């Protein structure tokens, strides 16, 4: 059920139930991060393999010390600008965090979501919320309560309505590798903005073999329909005769396909916000296959292109 009752959501969470929560990035499937039983429910409902760890969510930066044993100076500096906001910090965990949350890793991923409803919810709780994106494992991330309802509604008692997600892409995940800040997942905060505060950072092109980020699998965010990314006119020619859905950046390409245009004005923030909704829309439509094109590889475009490539990767 979708609703706006924060108190009801907090009561369910206190009882160990799961609740769909809005954030500025994507909707999360939230539960008490300190309860192993609840955390195991999250893995079960998402059908997520237990080797793929969960991010925990808190409402204020000063609480981070309750869950992490050391906070690097660079992260402190970034937190001044981006907390709350779409950055996740990978930190050495304290024992209070069950190892199920981190899939056995000594590191825990923590973030402070920038959404008034979820911040209010967190204030009513005396535990952090573990919350992966509220989609079945490997599928398209949800950016509205209705997306969550359609994918997981039958498995969870409540989804908090918080409108359409403002950013639309998951948080940027930062870790420290060889004593240097490293982007482990491109996301809602642009690398350029991070570098303007702490100087150059490393960027890891993640793959399945990467032990720092076991969940950043090559195939992810995938629609159920076949999805190809490339030059749209070429792909239209190649799949002539089939019913094609087009996820394009700015342009309308032909009359016979269903189009979802990310941003007519070529705005990458708008494209990010609309991206997952476009994939959901085309996947739900009557088309046989979906084709898409990369967007300019700058700013948020890098995070969009990362999702496009994973969504189109072989499963
Ligand atoms: O924006 C977001 O980050 C959203 C909202 C709901 O907060 N959450 C999200 O969670 O995207 P999820 O579970 O879909 O993606 C979390 C990613 C996974 O790829 C996982 O492998 C990585 O974070 N991660 C979490 N904890 C980790 C850890 N201890 N070590 C390495 N990677 C970790
Ligand atoms: Mg996810």
Image (cartoon, rainbow, N blue to C red):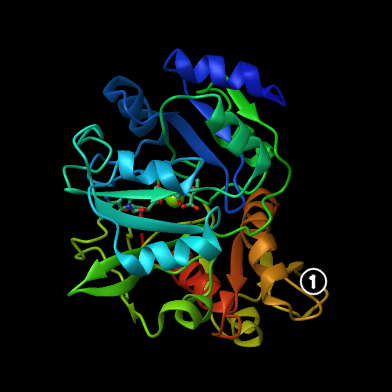
Residue 226 at least partly seen: no
Lateral position of residue 220 relative to residue 281, left or right: left
User: Which residue shows up at 57% across the image and 74% down it?
Assistant: 300
User: Which residue shows up at 54% across the image and 65% down it?
Assistant: 81
User: Which residue shows up at 52% across the image and 16% down it?
Assistant: 12
Total numbered labels = 1
**Image quadrant occupied by the N terminus:** top right
**In the image, residue 157 lies at what x, y percent?**
56, 18
User: Which residue shows up at 37% across the image and 61% down it?
Assistant: 219
Q: Nearer the viewer, residue 143 or 119?
A: 119
Q: Could you tell me which secondary element the residue under label 1 belongs to?
A: loop
Residue 286 at least partly seen: yes
**In the image, residue 23 lies at what x, y percent?**
59, 46
**In the image, residue 83 lies at what x, y percent?**
52, 55
Q: Nearer the viewer, residue 143 or 122?
A: 122
The residue pinned by badge 1 equals 256
């Amino acid at each position: 059920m979708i609703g706006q009752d924060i108190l009801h959501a907090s009561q369910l969470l206190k009882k160990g139930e799961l609740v769909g929560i809005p954030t500025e990035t994507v909707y999360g499937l939230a539960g008490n991060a300190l309860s192993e039983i609840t955390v195991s429910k999250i893995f079960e409902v998402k059908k997520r393999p237990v080797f793929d760890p969960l991010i925990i969510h808190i409402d204020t930066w000063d609480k981070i010390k309750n869950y992490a044993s050391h906070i690097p100076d660079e992260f402190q500096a970034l937190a001044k600008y981006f907390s709350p906001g779409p950055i996740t910090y990978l930190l050495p965990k304290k024992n209070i965090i069950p190892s199920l949350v981190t899939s056995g890793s000594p590191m825990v991923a923590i973030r402070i979501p920038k959404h008034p409803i979820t911040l209010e919810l967190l204030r009513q709780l005396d535990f952090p919320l573990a919350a992966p994106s509220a989609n079945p494992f490997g599928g398209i991330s949800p950016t509205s309560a209705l997306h969550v309802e359609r994918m997981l509604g039958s498995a969870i008692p409540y989804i908090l309505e918080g409108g359409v997600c403002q950013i639309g892409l998951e948080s940027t995940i930062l870790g420290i590798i060889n004593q240097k800040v490293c982007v482990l997942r491109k996301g809602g905060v642009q690398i350029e903005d991070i570098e303007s505060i702490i100087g150059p950072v490393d960027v890891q092109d993640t793959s399945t073999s990467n032990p720092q980020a076991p969940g950043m699998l090559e195939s992810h965010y995938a629609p159920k329909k076949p999805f190809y990314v490339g030059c749209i006119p070429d792909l239209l020619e190649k799949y002539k005769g089939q019913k094609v859905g087009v996820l394009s950046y700015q342009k309308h390409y032909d009359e016979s396909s269903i189009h979802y245009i990310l941003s007519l004005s070529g705005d990458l923030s708008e494209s990010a916000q609309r991206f997952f909704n476009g994939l959901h829309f085309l996947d739900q439509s009557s088309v046989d296959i979906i084709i898409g094109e990369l967007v300019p590889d700058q700013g948020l475009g890098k995070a969009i292109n990362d999702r496009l490539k994973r969504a189109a990767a072989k499963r």
